[in-house]
Amino acid sequence: KPIDETFWNHFQETLFYHHSEFDEDEGYRSLATFLNQLDARHATRGNRIYYLSVQPKYFPIIVEKLHKHGLIYNTQAPSWSRVIIEKPFGHDLPSMQKLQKQISENLNENQTYRIDHYLGKETVQNLLVFRFGNSIFEALWNYKHIDHVQITVAEDIGIGTRGHFYEEEGLLRDMLQNHMMQLLSLVAMEPPASLNASSIRDEKVKVLHSIRPFTTDDFEEGIIRGQYGPGFINDQNVVGYRQEKDVNPKSNIETFVALRLFIDNWRWAGVPFYLRGGKRLPKRGTEIAIVFKDAPGVLFQSKERPNLPNVLALRIQPDEGISMKINCKVPGPSSPIQPVKMDFRYSSYFGQSPPEAYERLILDCILGDSTLFARSDEVEQSWKIFTPVLDFWKAHPSQHFPNYASGSWGPHAADEMIQKEGRQWRIL
């Protein structure tokens, strides 16, 4: 984005750097002195946000030291202190619960902002307005009219310089347990009592509690894991995951996951949700696709009317917008049917691209609005869903990695999983 030079010159005068080790008391004492000086100079009244973009194992010690030296406090206006915590919040359910217990000794829930940048995307924020502000869609938003839902988070890049991180986390922890479950809960939630943070997050948690637990059959056939091998993408040859820097050459870490799950409540009874995410796929894109049931075919013969379900697609990135696929007659004397797309793009309609996700989320934290941040019970329930999967994978390492080439759409097993149920993945 172009930067206004006048604005930047003013902004950079408020940027400062302070160096310290995480576990040294003297560093926090000097930080407190430094921040007090800035408060006096800029009249910020002690209002502070601490952004912890570090490994989860460092969260407790940093929060404990901040509290010990009076840098975080739970007081009423005019002064406040808040902490933004990056994902992943924990490594599995036991580690998440331990981490939450440690942090809560020094930090209240209303001060804790667990950030997920996907929730800062304009299309994600628009989901509530789109669903509950348009009666034509909310009336159809249930098992009577929806055949299935697809959520895809595709990245064309590999792991880059994050070899150490990925060897500890893998894609399920990096992407599925947080990003994709946040998207799913917003798609599937019931109307909140109000638009305040507590009401919205209460409904999201209810969705997570309604997800049907995975079975052994699911582990073996309904959840597909993959790891990228060498291939060709974006006009260049690329190495496989096991050849990346800081990766075990015999690594069993997944870089792709596809699965099917069910939400056992009235609205979504029997409707499958298909989720897939992966690295080194053909293109970058994140999409939520609501695939509606076919209309009765009594008016059209099969030769004139192929299987063309209506699809509502919400594009999260890179080109944020919403499209609707409907069926129309092709002009002419015959009556073939062809799908057409009604398309809305934020950049085209409003004349500018939406703000970056982190811009919105950091502003919300400044304003004390936690709506778009994950609450502890959300994170805990998500780990309850996926920790059994991680335990199964640990006990049963894949014998087939790498099982998809870079530049492909993942393992063949992911296609077979959805095709055997008479459906197919959407092409982004």
Image: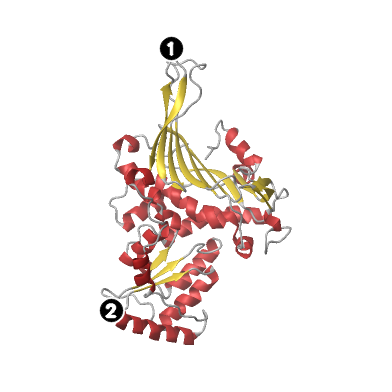
Q: Nearer the viewer, mark 1 or mark 2?
A: 1
Q: Is residue 209 visible?
A: no
Q: In the rendering, at what x and y percent does residue 200 appear?
A: 34, 53
Q: Is residue 353 above or below residue 292?
A: below
Q: Which residue is mark 2?
A: 43
Display coloring: secondary structure
Q: Secondary structure at mark 2?
A: loop
In the drawing, what numbered circle is on residue 333?
Answer: 1
In this rendering, the answer to whether 168 lies above or below 340 is below
Question: Residue 30 location, x and y as percent?
Answer: 43, 86
In the current view of this chain or complex, which residue is farthest to the front?
A: 5
> Is residue 231 shown to the viewer in this render?
yes
The three-letter code of the residue at mark 2 reads Ala
Binning the other alpha carbons within 10 Å of mark 2 as few (below 14), some (14 to 19) or many (20 upward) gives few
Q: Nearer the viewer, residue 363 or 83?
A: 363
Quadrant where the N terminus sits is: bottom left
Name the residue rendered at 35%, 58% in the picture.
Answer: 371
Count up the numbered dots: 2
Q: Position of residue 326 (x, y in %)?
A: 41, 29
Q: Is residue 352 left or right of residue 218?
A: left
- Outermost residue toward the top? 333
User: For residue 202, what is the image quadrant?
Assistant: bottom left
* Identity of the residue drawn at 55% across and 33% down: 423
Q: Secondary structure at mark 1?
A: loop
The answer to whether residue 239 is left or right of residue 1 is right
Residue type at mark 1: give it: Pro
- Which one is in front, 286 or 4? 4
Crowdedness near tag 1: few (<14), some (14–19) or many (≥20) residues, C-alpha within 10 Å: few
Counting from the top left corner in percent of width and height, residue 85 is at 45, 66
Q: Earlier in the sequence, mark 1 or mark 2?
A: 2
Q: CA distance from mark 1 to mark 2?
A: 75 Å
Task: Give the quadrant of residue 146.
Answer: top left
